[in-house]
Structures are given as C-alpha cells and as structure tokens.
Amino acid sequence: MQVEKREIVKRGLLIGLSVVILAGAITLLILVRPATVKVPFLDTKEMMRQVSPEWEKPGKYWVTHRATPNIFEGENEVAGIVLHHTAYEGSADLVVKDLCDPSNPVSCHVVIDKDGTRYVLAPPEAITWHAGFSKWGNRYRVNLFMIGIEFQGNTLVEPLTEAQIESAIEYMRPIIEKYNISADNIVTHQMIRDAYREANPKNKKAWPKVDITPEEYERVRNALDTARLLKF
Ligand SMILES: [Zn+2]
C-alpha cells in the first residue's frame, strides 16, 4: 500500500510539472510573438557585394563596373568634367540599364547613386554621348574632350546628398590630378548648352537645357575647393 501511494504522488507531481511547463511555454510564445510580422528588407546591393566579384570598394563608396556599349571612336582628351543630374527619381539601376542600352546611344562615364555608390560605365579616356549640342571656350562637341558625371535624382526637386558629393570627389580626384583639369573646365550641362545656344541662336533643336541646378553646382565646387581640387 505504501509503495502504491508513493507511486500516485510521483505521477501527480509529474503531471503537475508538465502542466506548469506547458503553461509557461504557451505564455512565453504569446508574450514574445511580435505584434506584426515584418518582411525582411532585401538589400540587393549588399547581396551583390557579397556574391559578385565585380563589386569593389576602393574608397569610402562602393563602385561597380558596367561597361556601356555606347562609346564612340577616338580618345577623350579628358580636359574637363560635365555635371548632370539624371532627372529621374527612381532606382539608379534603371538609369544604368538605359545608358547601357545599345538602341539608344546616350551614356556617360559614371552614375552616382544617392547613397554614393558609383556605377562606372566607361573609362575617362572613352568618348561617351552626354553633352549633346554643346560648346565650351571656343570649342564645340564637348563630348570629345570632357567626361560626364550623372548624379542620380532631380536637383530641381531634391538637393544632392552629402554621399553623392563626397563620392563624386572620390571619383574626380585621381582624374583631375592625372589630367590636370582646370577649375574653369568643371561645368554643368546647362552651361555648355547655354554657350552653344548663345553662339547658335537659330538652332531650334538646341532648346534650353535644364539640368543640375546652379546651387548644387556651387556645392560641388565648394567640395572641390575644400579637397584642393580647384586648379586655376
Ligand atoms: Zn545632362
């Protein structure tokens, strides 16, 4: 009888313990469960960095190379730099895709995304088509002697980000130093278009070009000045 009683108490204790553990586990599940289920954000750039060897990080900002087929015969003199904005608020990926589309010959040398990531489409020595009707100094066809930088976004709507300006300095520094580019030859698309229009007022195809704003141009100039890259 004694043994049987002990066995009943033992079973009772085991059942009690199981109930307590189960109740605890259920309470924990209810308390710990997040209120809303969050879908994880897929950082495709970060994934690219991890899996693709074409991504590299030579400086503070990421650089990827997407060779554009839209380059023209001859060698760029790299005597100057033309600043543009893409006027497109969406993803830089789409802009890059367009600038690499052989059915439309337009391209440039680099697209700088809002986070400072640079998409390098062509080496500075390549001739790309970004300037259109253009004139600087006493020379026409600016594409032949200047390279083109496209900042992602529309500066009429939103200013450049600090990262874009910093990344542009990082990109321009070795080029300005190698080719000894003068401060006078760092211009905007609008400036070279206006110079063309002034000299050719009858060309109706050269409509006034609205591109990166004078204010944003000034910010880039100031950053170049701070970086000691304005050579007069
Ligand atoms: Zn432009």
Image (tube, rainbow, N blue to C red):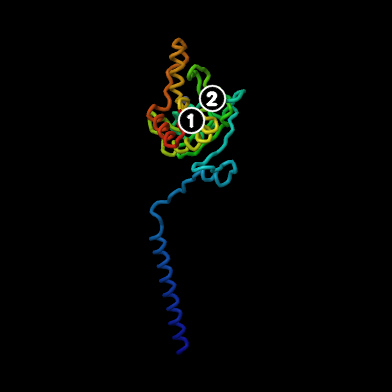
Q: Farthest residue toward the bottom?
A: 2
| Residue farthest to the right, as pictured | 73
Residue shown at 46%/21% (left/top)?
A: 192
Q: Which residue is mark 1?
A: 150
Number of residues whose C-alpha sits closer than 10 Å to that of mark 1, classed few (under 14), some (14–19) or many (20 or more)? many
Q: List x then y, in percent, for residue 145.
A: 54, 23
Ligand 1: does it lie within 8 Å of the C-beta at label 1?
yes
Where is residue 170 drawn, in percent x and y?
A: 49, 38
Work out which quarter of the rendered image holds the C terminus and state it. Answer: top left
Q: Is residue 155 above or below residue 27?
A: above
Asked if residue 70 is positioned above or below residue 174 in the image, the reply reads: above
Mark 2 nearby-residue class (10 Å; few <14, some 14–19, many ≥20):
some
Above or below, 214 relative to 37: above
Report, in whole angstroms, how far the alpha carbon at label 2 lies from the one at label 1: 12 Å
Q: From the image, tell me which residue sits under label 2.
A: 106
- Judging depth in this view, the residue of 175 and 114 nearest the camera is 175
Q: Secondary structure at mark 1?
A: strand
Q: Within 8 Å of ligand 1, the CB of disc 2? A: no
Tell me what residue is drawn at x 42 percent, y 66 percent. 25
Front residue of 69 and 200: 200
Position of residue 21 measured from the top left corner of the image (x, y, whole percent): 43, 70
Q: Residue at x 40, y 51 (%)?
A: 36
